[in-house]
Image (cartoon, rainbow, N blue to C red):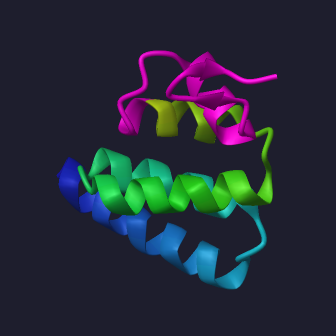
């Protein structure tokens, strides 16, 4: 039953993202649905679109850090802002 509800939610969030492609919330919600369904690549894509529309979206940052395997949201935030590379923090 939960899978059916998640599938229904996914359909709704896909429509929302189509109707309001400039809404970071639409992409954020879609990312959460994909994540719950185990569709990692689509979840990442959706959260990245959300973050592009709202770079301060902490929910997207947190989920992307988790999905991409960063041990720290702080490090991932630095990667997103371009202040971190494999050598460490750049100033």
In the drawing, does residue 71 fall left or right of residue 20? left
Q: Is residue 29 above or below residue 13?
A: above
In the drawing, does residue 36 fall left or right of residue 58? left
In the rendered image, the quadrant that contains the C terminus is: top right
Q: Which residues are magenta?
A: 66-91
Q: Name the spot of residue 86 as percent of width and height, x first.
A: 50, 28
The residue nearer to you, when weighing 6 against 69, is 69
- As for residue 77 lying within the magenta part, the answer is yes
In the drawing, does residue 26 fall left or right of residue 72? right
Residue 33: quadrant of the picture: bottom left
Q: Name the spot of residue 53 as percent of width and height, x first.
A: 77, 60
The residue nearer to you, when weighing 3 against 73, is 73
Q: Name the spot of residue 84 as percent of width and height, x first.
A: 64, 28
User: Count the marks: how many?
Assistant: 0
- As for residue 16 lying within the magenta part, the answer is no
In the drawing, does residue 37 fall left or right of residue 29? left
The residue nearer to you, when weighing 85 against 46, is 85
């Amino acid at each position: 039953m939960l899978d059916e509800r998640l599938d229904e939610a996914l359909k709704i969030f896909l429509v929302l993202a189509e109707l309001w492609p400039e809404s970071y919330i639409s992409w954020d919600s879609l990312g959460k649905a994909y994540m719950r369904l185990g569709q990692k690549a689509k979840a990442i894509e959706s959260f990245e679109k959300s973050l592009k529309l709202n770079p301060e979206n902490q929910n997207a940052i947190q989920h992307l850090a988790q999905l991409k395997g960063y041990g720290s949201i702080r490090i991932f935030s630095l990667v997103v802002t371009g202040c971190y590379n494999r050598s460490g923090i750049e100033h």
